[in-house]
Amino acid sequence: ALLQFKPAPMYILDEIDAALDLSHTQHIGHLFRTRFKGSQFIVVSLKEGLFTNANVLFRTRFRDGTSIVERTADRSGSSLYASGEHANEHEGAGGRRPRRAVAVV
């Protein structure tokens, strides 16, 4: 309701879909894209649902002690994790951090 009453030009949201299943996550992405065309959303997520509605995707990885941010043209989440590591919501064995993707809608 606040987004419609007095919309801001940009919103930054961190893992707003953490407690949602895939269908609800996709619905939120679709809602951002169709109902709030005058605003830009920068969303950090571990789930693929928001990625399909993004205009641009950035992924982050931790390699050799350094964080790396890469822009990707493909909007499917499976391509983000194609190197064999899959995103999950908890640190994996060996203390690896899960990968995150930033969707810009």
Image (spheres, rainbow, N blue to C red):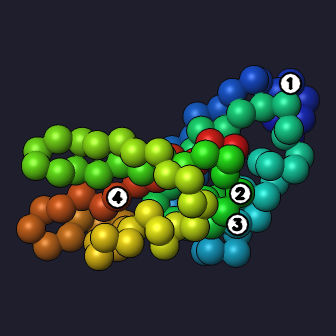
Q: Which SS class for mark 1?
A: loop
Q: CA distance from mark 3 to mark 1?
A: 24 Å
Which residue does the numbered mark 4 point to in the structure image? 99
Secondary element under disc 3, as helix, strand or loop, is helix
Mark with earlier residue (3, 1): 1
- Mark nearest the camera among 2 and 3 is 2
Mark carried by residue 21 = none
Q: Name the mark nearer the viewer: 4 or 1.
A: 4
- Mark 2 or mark 1, which is nearer the start of the sequence? 1
First of labels 2, 3 by sequence position = 3
Q: Are marks 1 and 2 in contact (CB under 8 Å)?
A: no
Q: Position of residue 26 (x, y in %)?
A: 70, 66
List the residue tagged with mark 3.
26
Q: Nearer the viewer, residue 34 or 2?
A: 34
Q: Mark 4 touching mark 1, by CB under 8 A?
A: no
- Furthest-front residue in view? 73
Amino acid identity at mark 1: Lys
CA distance for labels 3 and 4: 19 Å
Distance between the Cα atoms at labels 2 and 3?
Answer: 8 Å
